Image (spheres, helix red, strand yellow):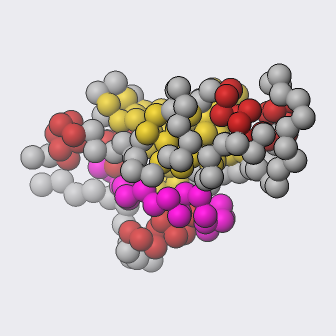
Amino acid sequence: MGIMSAFDEKYALTGKFIVALPQINDGGIFDHSLIYICSHTAHGTMGLVVNKRLEEFSFSDLTFQLPIDNYAKLSEISLYSGGPLEKVRGMVLHSTDYRKDGTIIVGKDIAVSSTTEIIADIAFDQGPKDKLVVLGYSFWQPRQLEAEIYRNDWFVLDADKDLLFETHDNEKWQRAMDTTRINLENFVPVTGHS
């Protein structure tokens, strides 16, 4: 069974990480990126980059756009660039202790919500314990991501809640690469044909 048909049956990427391998080095958003896959279906794949912090826009900027008054003074909440599409669309990857209408449980310990209610709850310090607030997302057409994995652009990993929520952004890619056990000095980004 080829790799393409192996992915067809189970849509095995939902709730997984993909880590960009070294040949994706264009300096863009996917360079050294770690992506959490929220949905992998016959209609395509949607994921969120989880290690690229936005510097030009803050959580306070986001809450000022909503009808929220007197919100809690929170310690730093970073915003992340989730991908190149709809860069003003906000989503929150979070722990499953928070569940409201519109919350989708993606993995064992990880959910995603995209309502203004979760932003308000975070602003009032009533949101999920663990959270990543993301603007924008990444999307691949059907079979596109599978083809990129096949040509060694990405490595698939089991999602790790600690890596997602507890690891410093600058360390996420390297920690993910360390779990692959790929020796980057010997890595050859070419697939074979027989």
Q: Is residue 158 above or below residue 127?
A: below
Picture quarter containing residue 90? top right
Left or right of 22 on screen, residue 158: left
| Quadrant, the C terminus | bottom left
Left or right of 5 on screen, residue 124: right
Where is residue 80? Give x, y as percent. 68, 45
Q: Which residues are magenta?
A: 150-171
Q: Is residue 70 above or below residue 96?
A: above
- 37 or 83, nearer to the observer: 37
Q: Is residue 58 above or below residue 139?
A: below
Q: Residue at x 42, y 56 (%)?
A: 159
Where is residue 151? Give x, y as percent. 33, 50
Magenta segment includes 20: no
Is residue 116 shown to the viewer in this render? yes
Is residue 81 shown to the viewer in this render? no
Picture quarter containing residue 169? bottom right
